[in-house]
Amino acid sequence: DLPLTPEVTEALLAGWQDEYNAYNTYQAIIDQFGAVRPFTAIQAAEAQHISELEFLFERYAIAIPEPQTLSAVPQFATLADACAAGAEAEIANFGLYDQWITTAENYPDIAWVFNALRDASEFRHLPVFERCAG
């Protein structure tokens, strides 16, 4: 296997942290509003995304760091507001993956995972959050 460039390693770590941030944000929303959809389902998907990235960490011998915690626990006035924030976060997420897919173009396995996670954000999570936001 081709050794990882620092840029690809950084993209993997940043993607992993971004997925953790989403997971923790959705947990904060569940803590505030109860075990409500779509947050319970999308949080489970974020856990799967974390696992997919950690598989790549193992494959490329990257130590799994301690995830950073959220600097502030988000609070929302309504569930629709939380969904609107979720939609914004998913748009930002797939924008990052668009950049990282190019960064990882010489690593087909990493580019494939990045593309799958990117598509999950745009085509699965974003529409659900947009419907929920009204």
Image (cartoon, grey):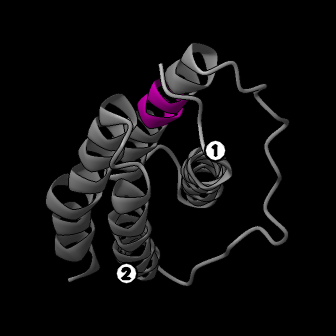
Question: In screen coordinates, is 134 left or right of 105?
Answer: left
**Which circle, 2 or 1, is nearer the viewer?**
1
> Mark 2, residues whose alpha carbon is within 10 Å: few (<14), some, or many (≥20)?
some
Image position of 90 with respect to 35: above or below? below
Residue with the mark numbered 1:
9
- Queried whether the magenta region covers residue 48, the answer comes back as yes
Residue at screen point 59% across, 56% down? 18
Disc sitting over residue 132 in the figure: none
Residue 84: numbered disc: 2
Distance between the Cα atoms at labels 2 and 1?
Answer: 31 Å
Question: Which residue type does callout 1 highlight?
Answer: Thr
Mark 2 belongs to which amino acid? Ala
Depth check, front residue: 30 or 55:
55
- The magenta stretch is 47-53
x and y, in percent, of residue 113 in the image: 33, 36
- Most common secondary structure along the magenta stretch: helix
**Left or right: 66 as drawn, with respect to 124:** right
Whether tag 2 and tag 1 are in contact, CB under 8 A, the answer is no
Look at 47% across and 43% down and name the residue there: 35
Pinpoint residue 93: horizontal percent, then vertical percent.
42, 66
Looking at the image, residue 60 lies above or below residue 49: above
Q: Nearer the viewer, residue 40 or 92?
A: 92
